Image (spheres, rainbow, N blue to C red):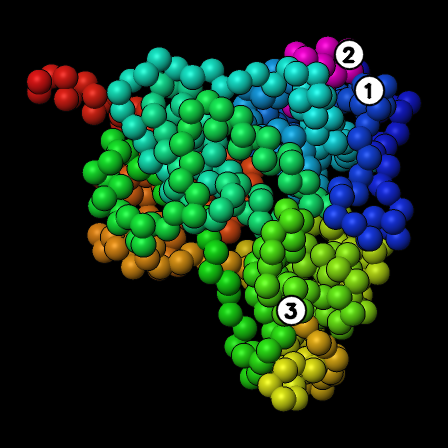
Amino acid sequence: MLKFVVAGQDYPDKRDAWDRARDFAEIADKYAPVKAEEQASRCSQCGVPYCTVHCPLHNHIPDWLRLTAEGRLREAYELSNATSTMPEICGRICPQDRLCEGNCVIEFSGHGAVTIGSVEKFITDTAWEQGWVEPVQVGAARGQSVGIIGAGPAGLTAAELLCVEGYEVHIYDRHDRAGGLLTYGIPGFKLEKPVVMRRVERLKAAGIVFHEGFEVGRDASMDELRQRHDALLIATGVYKARAIKADGVDLDGVVEALDYLTASNRKGFGDTVAAYDDGSLNAQGKRVVVIGGGDTAMDCVRTAVRQGAASVECLYRRDRDNMPGSQREVGNAEEEGVRFVWLAGPERFTGADGRVTAVEANAMKLSAADASGRRAPIADPDGGFTVEADLVIKALGFDAEDLPKLFGARDLGVTRWGTVRVDNATMMTSLDGVFAAGDIVRGASLVVWAIRDGRDVAAAMHKFLRTKAASERKAA
C-alpha cells in the first residue's frame, strides 16, 4: 500500500470519443488485474477513512482496496458485497468525484484520488465472471409476506434482504421490466442493461415474485395490498417531470427527458417503440437542445449524439461550477461533441405549424451566494439569443407523483413537496405497517442513497414484522 508516491492515478482507458459516440456500449474499458492491483495499492490506509465516511453505504473501502492490491479478489468481493447489494452498479454510476474519491486524503495532498469506483466495478465484474456471486441465501420461511411497490434500487435492495430473513416477498412495478431508472432512465453507455438484469434474475431465482406491468390504483388498491401482505413498502421513486413555465412548451418536439430516455432504452432491448420509430422521440438528423444541468440532462445530450443528431446543445441557467451534474459527465459529453451554453435560461419556444423550431433564451447572471452557498440565476435584461431546434428535451429534474390519489390512499401522509412522510426512527408512513424508502421519501437523489434506504428500511420492517408475529402468537 501507500504506493501513491510512485504510481500515478490511472483510470481505465476510455474508448475514442468518435467510436464510442456511435453505440450505446459502456465507454470505459475494464482494468487488467495487474492495473487494478496497482491502483488499489495507492490507498494510504487512513486511520479515519474519509472515503468510507462520505459513502452513503459506509463501504469498507480501504479494506477491500488492500485485499485487491494483495490479489485476494474473492475476499475483496465478499467484503464489498457485505455492505452493498449492487457494488458493480455503484462502481459505474455513483458520482465518486462528489463522494468517496472527492474526499480521498491523497486527493487533498495533490496526488490524485484512488480510483475507487473503477476498482469497485472491477472486483464485482470479476466475481460474476468467476462464479463467486452466489444465489441469495433464502432464510427459513417465517409465514409472513411483504409487498414492495417499485422495483428500483431501494425496492430491490429491501426485497433481497427481507428474502434472506425468510419473508415471502412480492414486488409490484408498473413497468414491464424491473430495475426502475436503472433499466429505463440510465443509458447503456453508463450502465449496460445485462448488468442490471442479472441482478433481477438472481432475485427471481430466489423466489421473489415480480408482478410487472402492475399499477397500484388500477390493478389493486393500496388497501387491497395491505390485506394481502403483513407489511408494505413504497419505493416508487419520483417520476413527475418538473415543468418549464414558458410560452410554446406544448409545441410538438418539446418532450420530457424520461420519455425520451425510456424510448431509447426500450429500443436497446429490441422493443417496438412507436414514438421512436415515427421520430417523435428520436434525435436522428435533428438539431437538439436539452434544457437542464443535472445528470439526466447529461444522459440526454449523450444519447442524442448516439442517435445521430445534427447538433446537440445544452442550455443551463447557471455556470459550469454551479451545475448539479457530474463534471466527469460534462467532460465526456464535450469530448463527444456536445456544446454547452452556460448562463442561459429558456424564455419561450417558437415554432411553425405546431412544431418547435427554436428556443428563445435569456442570458443569465448569478446573484451573490445565499446562506446555503447557492447563487440564484437572474435574467440579464441586456442579453438574449435564439437557438434553432427541431427537438427540445426538458431535463429539469423530477418531483413526486400524487400517490394518495394515484393509490386511492387518502390517509397516506405526504410532505408539502409530495414526498411520502415517514417516521424517522421507524421509516413507517402514516399507515400502520406501510413503510417508504428511497427517492419517494428523500426526493430525487442518488442510486447509492436508494440502496442505503433499502437496507435501512429492510431492517426496520424486519423489526416490525417480528413484533407483529410475537403479538399474534401471544393473542392466539
- Look at the picture and state if 145 lies above or below 82: below
Region of the chain picked out in magenta, as a range: 61-75
Residue drawn at x 50%, y 63% as measured from the top left: 241
Which residue shows up at 46% across the image and 22% down it? 206
**Of the numbered discs in the image, which one, if any, rests on residue 33?**
1
**Crowdedness of circle 2 by 10 Å Cα count: few (<14), some, many (20+)?**
some
Looking at the picture, how far across and down is residue 403, in whole percent? 34, 55
The residue tagged 3 is 278
Element type at mark 1: helix
Circle nearer the viewer, 3 or 1: 3
- The residue where tag 2 is placed is 71
Q: Is residue 318 shown to the viewer in this render?
A: no
Secondary element under disc 2, as helix, strand or loop, is loop
Which image quadrant for residue 335?
A: bottom right
Mark 2 or mark 3, which has the lower sequence index? 2
What is the distance, in whole Å, between disc 2 and disc 1 at their CAs?
A: 8 Å
**Mark with earlier residue (2, 1):** 1
Query: What is the x, y in percent for residue 138?
Result: 43, 17
Ranked by sequence position, the earlier of labels 3 and 1 is 1
**Rendered image quadrant of residue 285:** bottom right
Query: On screen, 312 above or below 451?
Result: below
